[in-house]
Image (cartoon, rainbow, N blue to C red):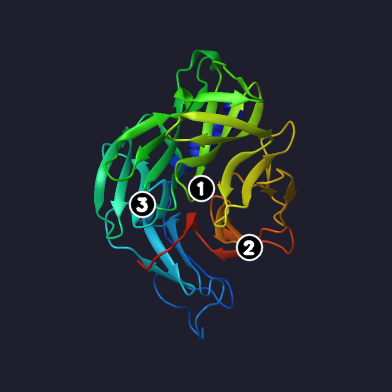
Amino acid sequence: MSRGRWLALIGVLCAAGAVGYLALAALDPSPVTTKARPPGATGPPTGLAGSRLMVRAVARKDPGLNGHLFVIKRGRPRALEGDLACARVHFAAGRGLCLSTAPSGVSYEATIFGADLEPVERLSLAGLPSRARVSPNGRYGAMTVFVNGHEYLGAGGFSTRTSIVDMRDGGELGELEEFDVFKAGRRLESPDFNFWGITFAADPDRFYATLRTGGRHYLVEGSVSRRRLRVLRDGVECPSLSPDGSRIAFKSRIPGEDLWRLAVLDVATLADHPVGERRSIDDQPEWLDDGTLVYSDGFDVFTVAADGSGSPRRVLRDATSPVALDLNL
């Protein structure tokens, strides 16, 4: 990723704190907001009927709402009580991970929280929040941040740091840069390793992530306990494992550009196909169910079929970090 792209991304995240009003909207058949239903609307909106999502607000008029958490159930948004305001959030099996700017405003932190939205642990972060994931059983959490200072990047360059933590007590289980990496049975070493975008399997010891080295973006499979990574294939960023474990949704870089297409690969064959979203999406998608992806373009939340059919559908306005919930909140 070019230096300009890193700086632009940082600008987007920082600017979010200066914009305001949250208007989460299920667009079919009519919008709703967190304030009140619009005049003339009848019946519950059906854009997310039967689904439950947690999202963070992209506030446009009220900076005090920016990053606050909402749950969408049967198409209706409901604000969650509590003081959490997140740049990135993920949640599974009663445990959540919120990456945010610390109250001082000059550093970053991760908050592990429970189903009651109360903090369990607070951890310092080494840089700007980028990605967050919790394993399906709530045991492990993964955090990616942007950092600077790596000599190989040159002055002002940015890289990533990805770590895994125990969600019970916040204990760090290691940074991926410390893990052994193997490609085609041979150990792979380079000073320019960058990792991001962990996604956990049902067995949380197994996970997938992106490794960037030598200008290439590899899908790697890892083991927490063995501290080992294996390169599977090239051209995969921000992987997200389906609930049934058979497919991985990811963003695929357009050669020579900082633009991406969403795609899905088969875990058994590693063959992939694009989905119906034609725009460039810079996000780690989430699976709403085994057949549907949910993701954000940085401002709104969309769904699209994972099999490549159909077209994307905007289901929520002014929201990012969609998380498919496995329990009521």
| Relative to 169, 215 lies left or right | right
Q: Quadrant of the N terminus?
A: top right
Disc 2 to disc 1, C-alpha distance:
17 Å
Dot 3 and dot 2 residues touching (CB under 8 Å)? no
- Identify the element where label 2 is drawn: loop
- Mark nearer the viewer, 2 or 1: 1
Disc 3 to disc 2, C-alpha distance:
24 Å
- Identify the element where label 3 is drawn: strand
- The residue where tag 2 is placed is 291
Q: Could you classify mark 3 by the number of other residues whose Cα lies within 10 Å: few (under 14), some (14-19), or many (20 or more)?
A: many
Residue plotted at (68% across, 34% down): 233
Decide: is 254 above or below 89. Answer: above
Q: Residue 66 at what x, y percent from top left? A: 39, 53
Decide: is 287 above or below 155. Answer: below
Residue plotted at (42% across, 38% down): 143
| Relative to 277, 107 lies left or right | left
Which circle's residue, 2 or 1, is located before the other in the chain?
Answer: 1
- Amino acid, disc 2: Gly
- Mark nearer the viewer, 3 or 2: 2
Decide: is 165 above or below 329. Answer: above
- The residue where tag 3 is placed is 96
Q: Quadrant of the C terminus?
A: bottom left
- The residue where tag 1 is placed is 201
Q: Residue 298 at what x, y percent from top left? A: 54, 50
Quadrant of residue 58 within the rendered picture? bottom left
- Amino acid, disc 1: Ala
